[in-house]
């Protein structure tokens, strides 16, 4: 790994002193020179070591061969202290989630185990290439060529995000570019390792590393650096992508200075954290303008242009794209990688990207703490407008459904679609912790669930008028067209879904390959939580009809406060059938879009009811089961609209 970056010119090589990736390429608090017992030629668990390639934050990296398949791998041995059984178990669990990714731009993890001396290793797909920044500089790629390459990287990251996987350590050395038929092919490596090694640390683990920054400082998002307990989401990866893009455009990283490199070398962790949280980056074009003439000329030559041309290219649109990625307040960044890709593609196609103009944040001070006022104001605005930001899309025929869906994909969470008198909301791909940490039994044991694709779910429980329009009957105990239908058993609810699918297909309201069905219980809980982690998504009286406010009767749907994804009555009013068979224990580890057991004697129902006798039944995690043939005056259902196959 080079300790300085060089830019090639026709007369030779010009050294650029400012960007010094080697000085900041290790997590703080890590000693990269730790001795290791692994020797060239040694065979470990079926992998023959060929040569040592580098020493990094995780440990050492070797080029090796998987003997039985005769294929090259990157053999990564973790540092001492990162080799516990807990980490190994997390790695195995994370692998189940990573298995859902199938993208040519993502390098796969092949295996993981312990060396004979108890050190943990990972064998990963071997990528014979340079880091993306080195590749671009050595070949003097133009700005447009760099952006084309960057789009491939974004596509890979977006693929992972849609499956609920966050990288957490995006940097040039984790984006390697190989060539096939003289064409560059970037691959993102080390997916899942940061989560497997650092995820869900115990109290003791937190104390052990409390003086370290977990990640690579100059590429790290403010929320990751702050380590305040704020959940890291896709916008942290978007920040890191912005840093990589910044570097591709102007050769520096946004906060990189000699002062930063010195503080990293001296392990002044709090000082580095403060810089990440508070130092505002210059625009890339401004960085070029203010650097020494010789350095600016060298940077421009490496992008196949002159300084004036480079500054003009960056200042038109690309400055705004980069700075939007690098907002300290993650709510001001791109919400998805797809949005970032759209703006870059618009630039490449010579269109003007519809980027929100950069405005200084109105804060009471600098850094995340000083932005609390701004965040609170944004939250208040969201409460005031509610779901009005997601206007209903009226579906009049199959073509309009396909057109709207493609136009929005991936739709924002809570996007509404109206199909005749059925209102549905979009539930995005993602991952969440299912279950209840307070439950000591296996019935609601916490475990991670990953959804690799999204789905639509009805905004409310199925009403009596909707039921009658399809089935022609009025089975409910309580009467009212806008009351939830009840007194229907599980088989009848499934039959309703089947008939509604047939009806809408005949009328051309939904395309082939889509169907109405009952939600799985994991889909139900994911939708009910809508990103929250507490017992329920809001104050009970505001969100639910329950014994203390219902008068022991059902109420018209949609009258209580919706959750963040626009869904009403997920708690209270009537229980809701789910598609799963009921069993009294949850799985362990990570599961991907689970559908429940293949057989059983009872079906799951969720959400509590207007007459639930205990508040714990009115929680997102609570689950019950009953024979599928049972009808009751407090059991109804809601619908999922899902793409089960492609036409």
Image (cartoon, rainbow, N blue to C red):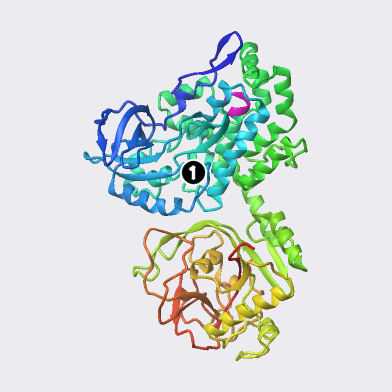
Picture coordinates of residue 33 (x, y %)? 32, 25
For mark 1, give the secondary structure.
Answer: loop
**Residue 365 at x, y = what percent?**
61, 37
Residue 84 in percent (x, y) is at 28, 45
Q: Number of numbered discs present?
A: 1
Report which residue position mark 1 lands on. 167
* Secondary structure mainly formed by the magenta segment: helix
Residue 370 can be seen in this image? no
Q: In front here: 508 or 353?
A: 508
Q: Which residue: 50% across, 29% down? A: 131
Q: Residue furthest left?
A: 117
In the image, residue 157 sits, relative to residue 174, either above or below, namely below
Residue 2 at x, y percent in the picture: 45, 21
Q: In which quarter of the view is residue 249 placed?
A: top right
Q: Residue at x 50, y 42 (%)?
A: 106
Quadrant in the rendering for residue 493: bottom right
Q: Nearest the camera: 54 or 20?
A: 54
Image quarter in which the C terminus is found? bottom right
Span highlighted in magenta in the image: 247-252
- Residue 277 can be seen, yes or no: yes
Q: Quadrant of residue 293?
A: top right
Q: Is residue 289 left or right of residue 79?
A: right
Looking at the picture, does residue 314 appear above or below residue 577?
Answer: above
In the figure, is residue 63 to the left or right of 497? Answer: left
């Amino acid at each position: 790994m080079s300790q300085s970056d060089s830019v090639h010119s026709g007369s030779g090589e010009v050294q650029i002193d400012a960007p010094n990736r080697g000085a900041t390429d290790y997590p703080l608090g890590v000693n990269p020179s730790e001795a290791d017992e692994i020797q060239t030629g040694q065979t470990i668990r079926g992998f023959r070591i060929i040569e040592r390639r580098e020493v990094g934050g995780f440990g050492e990296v070797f080029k090796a061969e998987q003997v039985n398949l005769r294929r090259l791998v990157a053999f990564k041995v973790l540092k001492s202290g990162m080799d516990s059984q807990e980490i190994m178990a997390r790695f195995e669990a994370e692998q189940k989630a990573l298995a859902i990714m199938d993208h040519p731009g993502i390098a796969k993890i092949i295996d993981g185990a312990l060396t004979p001396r108890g050190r943990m290793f990972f064998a990963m797909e071997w990528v014979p290439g340079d880091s993306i920044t080195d590749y671009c500089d050595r070949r003097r790629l133009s700005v447009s060529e760099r952006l084309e390459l960057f789009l491939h990287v974004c596509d890979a990251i977006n693929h992972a995000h849609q499956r609920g996987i966050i990288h957490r350590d995006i940097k040039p050395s984790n984006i390697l570019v190989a060539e096939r038929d003289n064409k560059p092919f970037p691959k993102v490596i080390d997916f899942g390792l940061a989560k497997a090694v650092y995820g869900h640390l115990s109290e003791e683990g937190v104390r052990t590393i409390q003086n370290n920054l977990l990640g690579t400082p100059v590429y790290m998002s403010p929320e990751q650096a702050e380590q305040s307990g704020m959940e890291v989401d896709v916008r942290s990866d978007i920040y890191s992508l912005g840093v990589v893009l910044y570097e591709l455009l102007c050769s520096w990283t946004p906060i990189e200075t000699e002062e930063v490199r010195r503080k990293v070398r001296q392990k002044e962790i709090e000082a580095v954290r403060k810089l990440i949280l508070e130092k505002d980056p210059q625009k890339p074009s401004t960085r070029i303008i203010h650097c020494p003439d010789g350095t600016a000329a060298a940077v421009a030559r490496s992008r196949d242009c002159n300084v004036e041309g480079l500054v003009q290219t960056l200042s038109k649109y690309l400055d705004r794209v980069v700075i939007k990625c690098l907002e300290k307040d993650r709510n001001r960044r791109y919400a998805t990688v797809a949005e970032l890709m759209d703006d870059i593609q618009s630039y490449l196609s010579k269109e003007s990207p519809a980027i929100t103009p950069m405005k200084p944040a109105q804060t009471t001070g600098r850094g995340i703490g000083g932005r609390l006022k701004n965040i609170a104001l944004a939250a208040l605005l969201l409460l005031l407008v509610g779901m009005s930001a997601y206007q209903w899309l009226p579906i009049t025929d199959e073509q309009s459904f396909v057109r709207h869906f493609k136009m929005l994909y991936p739709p924002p969470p809570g996007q509404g679609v109206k199909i005749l008198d059925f209102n549905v909301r979009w539930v995005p791909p993602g991952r969440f912790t299912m279950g209840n940490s307070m439950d000591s039994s296996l019935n609601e044991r916490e475990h991670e669930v990953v959804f690799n694709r999204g789905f639509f779910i009805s905004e409310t429980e199925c009403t009596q008028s909707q039921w009658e329009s399809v089935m022609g009957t009025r089975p409910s105990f309580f009467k009212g067209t806008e009351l939830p239908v009840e007194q229907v058993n599980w088989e009848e609810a499934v039959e309703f879904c089947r008939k509604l699918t047939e009806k809408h297909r005949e009328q051309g309201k939904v395309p082939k390959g889509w169907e109405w069905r009952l939600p799985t219980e994991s889909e139900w809980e994911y939708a009910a939580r809508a990103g929250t982690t507490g017992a329920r998504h809001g104050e009970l009286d505001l969100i639910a009809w329950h014994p203390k406010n219902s008068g022991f009767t059902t109420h018209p749907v949609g009258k209580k406060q919706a959750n963040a994804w626009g869904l009403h009555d997920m708690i209270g009013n009537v229980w809701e059938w789910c598609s799963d068979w009921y069993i009294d224990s949850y799985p362990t580890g990570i599961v991907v879009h689970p559908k429940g057991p293949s057989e059983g004697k009872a079906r799951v129902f969720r959400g509590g009811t207007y007459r639930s006798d205990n508040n714990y039944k009115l929680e997102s995690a609570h689950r019950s089961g009953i024979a599928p043939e049972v009808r009751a005056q407090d059991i109804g259902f809601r619908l999922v609209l899902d793409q089960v196959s492609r036409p």
